[in-house]
Amino acid sequence: MPRVVRKRIEVEAVLLCITVALAVIAAFILDKDSAPHRWHPAIAWTAVTFFTLVLWCREKWRALSFWLFWLASLFLQAGAMWLIFGRVLVRLSLGTLFVMPIAFVESIFLALVFLRLERRLRRNADMS
């Protein structure tokens, strides 16, 4: 296996381990004072969305604009998850696997939004 491919697989494996570790920590924290498994779909949705976004935008990792966009989107996602699962769907028991397709579509949407935003910022910088 070429060295570059092996390094890429190692980086992705480390990112996956970090994502899973953060999701488990979030589950422990959020399950303390609420019904068991209530927040698991929200955690899985967020983890899948942002892990996939990072993998798809791998070429943009060196750009500060990508990480600012990623962080802003993560904060908006956390607020949306709190609103959806904490206020609107309080009594709904939703399985974790049901949110996976939604998370996948959301990651595609966020990647497209970022690429369009980046193109617009680059065009504005060229005009200046």
Image: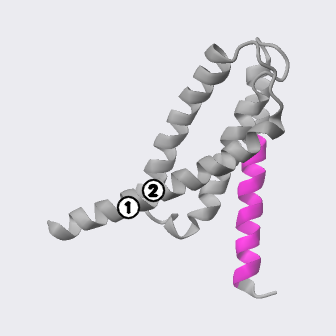
Callout 2 amino acid: Phe
- The quadrant where residue 39 appears: top right
Q: Nearer the viewer, residue 46 or 5?
A: 46
* Residue depicted at 74% across the width and 59% down the height: 14
**Rendered location of residue 37, percent (x, y):** 83, 23
**Rendered location of residue 100, percent (x, y):** 75, 44
Q: Residue furthest left?
A: 128
* Residue depicted at 50% across the width and 34% down the height: 76
* Residue depicted at 64% across the width and 62% down the height: 55
Name the element at disc 1.
helix
Q: Nearer the viewer, residue 49 or 18?
A: 49
**Rendered location of residue 11, percent (x, y):** 70, 66
Q: Which residue carries the number 2 mark?
A: 114
In the image, residue 6 lies in the stretch drawn in magenta:
yes
Q: Is residue 60 above or below residue 85?
A: below
**Are there few (<14), some (14-19), or many (20+) residues within 10 Å of tag 2?**
some
Mark carried by residue 61: none
Q: Main secondary structure of the magenta part?
A: helix
- The quadrant where residue 38 appears: top right
Name the element at disc 2.
helix
Mark carried by residue 118: 1
Q: Is residue 126 above or below residue 107?
A: below
**Are there few (<14), some (14-19), or many (20+) residues within 10 Å of tag 1?**
some
In the image, residue 33 lies in the stretch drawn in magenta:
no
Q: Are marks 1 and 2 in contact (CB under 8 Å)?
A: yes
Callout 1 amino acid: Glu
**Rendered location of residue 65, percent (x, y):** 40, 56
Q: Nearer the viewer, residue 22 or 45?
A: 45
Position of 11 compared to 50: left or right?
Answer: right
Residue range corresponding to the magenta coloring? 4-21
**Quarter of the figure that contains the N terminus:** bottom right
